[in-house]
Image (cartoon, rainbow, N blue to C red):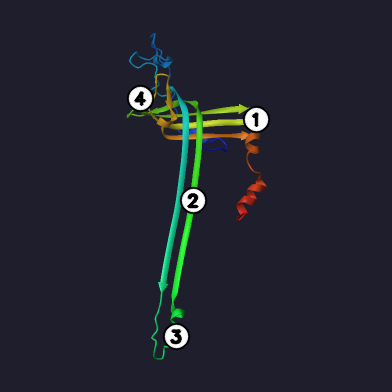
């Protein structure tokens, strides 16, 4: 999930459904007009079918680290009491050292995205999975917002209402962004961003 301008090549870079001409064989039921056999029902399973992705993305991370170290050392020398070194003071030859370190750190992050977006099956694979892609652009009074989605799902996970949770889609790419007065007001100015980059503090 990220902001910024919508990626114009997001949908164009993914496979698009091929254009299939409607047959003219005079039959009453035509598959191109939405007819499905009784054993298939109306569940999406073909290229071009629509699937509603229910966005229930919620990610929470928390990490805590701590470290404690300590080190002590001591050395002493006892000089002889007689002879040429008898003048040395034993207390002056004792040495000791100690060091300690305490450190801790905590990091946490939480993001959440709820909603729904309808996508199109762009490719059906032999193993029962399908590539879906879709986007929604909204032009509001205070700016524009968009949601772009792509991922791989299992056709068996689509329910009878042609809905599927986003948590059951693999390789999901979710891009949510916007532009306008509200988005500009929530960002610092260019001069503030410049000082944040060059400031050593």
Between 81 and 185, the residue placed more toward the observer is 81
User: Would you identify the image quadrant in which residue 30 lies?
Assistant: top left
Asked whether the residues under the numbered discs 2 and 3 touch, taking CB atoms below 8 Å apart as contact, a structural biologist would say no
With 72 as the anchor, is 180 left or right in this view? right
Asked whether the residues under the numbered discs 1 and 4 touch, taking CB atoms below 8 Å apart as contact, a structural biologist would say no
Mark 4, residues whose alpha carbon is within 10 Å: few (<14), some, or many (≥20)? few
Q: CA distance from mark 2 to mark 3?
A: 49 Å
User: Would you identify the image quadrant in which residue 40 lies?
Assistant: top left
Q: Secondary structure at mark 1?
A: loop
Question: Can you tell which mark lies on residue 142?
Answer: 1
Q: CA distance from mark 3 to mark 1?
A: 87 Å
Q: Quadrant of the C terminus?
A: bottom right
Q: Which one is closest to the eye, mark 2 or mark 1?
A: 2
Q: Secondary structure at mark 2?
A: strand
| Residue on which the image places disc 2 | 105
Question: Can you tell which mark lies on residue 169?
Answer: none
Mark 2, residues whose alpha carbon is within 10 Å: few (<14), some, or many (≥20)? few
| Residue on which the image places disc 3 | 88
Report whether residue 120 is seen. yes
Q: Earlier in the sequence, mark 3 or mark 4?
A: 3
Mark 3, residues whose alpha carbon is within 10 Å: few (<14), some, or many (≥20)? some
């Amino acid at each position: 999930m990220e902001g910024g301008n919508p990626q114009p090549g997001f949908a164009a870079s993914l496979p698009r459904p091929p254009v299939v001409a409607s047959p003219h064989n005079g039959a009453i039921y035509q598959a191109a007009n939405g007819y499905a056999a009784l054993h298939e029902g109306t569940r999406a399973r073909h290229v071009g079918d629509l699937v509603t992705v229910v966005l229930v993305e919620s990610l929470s991370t928390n990490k805590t680290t701590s470290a404690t170290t300590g080190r002590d050392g001591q050395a002493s020398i006892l000089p002889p009491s007689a002879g040429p070194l008898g003048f040395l003071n034993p207390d002056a030859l004792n040495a000791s050292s100690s060091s300690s370190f305490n450190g801790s750190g905590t990091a946490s992050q939480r993001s959440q995205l709820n909603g729904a977006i309808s996508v199109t099956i762009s490719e059906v694979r032999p193993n029962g999975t399908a590539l879906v892609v879709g986007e929604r652009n909204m032009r509001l009074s205070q700016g524009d917002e968009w949601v772009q989605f792509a991922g791989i799902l299992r056709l068996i996970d689509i329910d009878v209402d042609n809905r599927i949770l986003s948590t059951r889609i693999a390789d999901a790419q979710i891009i949510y962004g916007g532009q306008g007065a509200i988005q500009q007001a929530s960002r610092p100015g260019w001069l503030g961003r410049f000082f944040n980059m060059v400031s050593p503090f």
